[in-house]
Amino acid sequence: MDKIFKTVASSHVSISVLMLPSHTNFSGKIHGGYILSLLDQIAFACGSKFSGNYCVTASVDTVNFLKPIEVGELVTMKASVNYVGKSSMVVGIRVEAENIQTGYKKHCNSSYFTMVAKDNEGNSVPVPGLILSNFEDVKRFCNSLKQIALKKERDHHQEVFNYTSKETLEGLKKYNIQINLD
């Protein structure tokens, strides 16, 4: 059976949602948890569209809240598959908020979700290969490779790092902490 490949463009999904007073936090800005819920929904839609299968969120790799979102702004989220593995995909999402009275737009959030394609029994299934059609696609793919490598390095560090060594504890003294070990 020949391997199937799809373009990054074939994964594109966008949604726009008007921000309502019911979406606010205690400071009157749009609640980050509400935005996270929308991010997860669009990551699911993007991964499922690209893979042709149900997808689950394996990890939320990055969520950068850059600017607050106000009530009455129109929030548009644009998602695309930036990287594919065997059954996983990294979905990049850009969030912009638009003041619908002035037309002013601001970049409010950038996020990266790892989604895994599943079959009806819940088993991971292969995803199509990714066709990189322009240098922006190549840049996003390479950035995903770097993020994956950093995640593996961090996980390895946690496995081998000695948190109880004298050197580690001594090195922590320069931080705004107090260590009270019994």
Image (cartoon, helix red, strand yellow):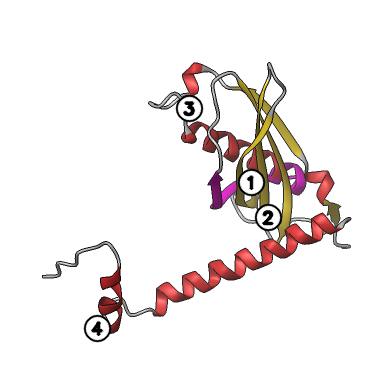
Q: Amino acid at mark 1?
A: Cys
Cβ atoms at labels 3 and 4 below 8 Å apart: no
Residue 50 in view here: yes
The answer to whether residue 177 is above or below residue 94 is below
Q: Which residue is mark 2?
A: 89
Give the distance between the C-alpha atoms of the residues marked 1 and 2, in whole angstroms: 10 Å
Residue nearer the viewer, 102 or 153:
102
* Helix, strand or loop under label 4: helix
Viewer-side label of 1, 3? 3
Cβ atoms at labels 1 and 3 below 8 Å apart: no
Cβ atoms at labels 4 and 1 below 8 Å apart: no
Residue 85 in view here: no
The answer to whether residue 92 is above or below residue 98 is below
State which tag comes first along the sequence, 4 or 1: 1
Q: Dividing the image into 4 quarters, which one contains the N terminus? A: bottom right
The magenta stretch is 47-65
- Dot 4: few (<14), some (14–19), or many (≥20) neighbours within 10 Å? few
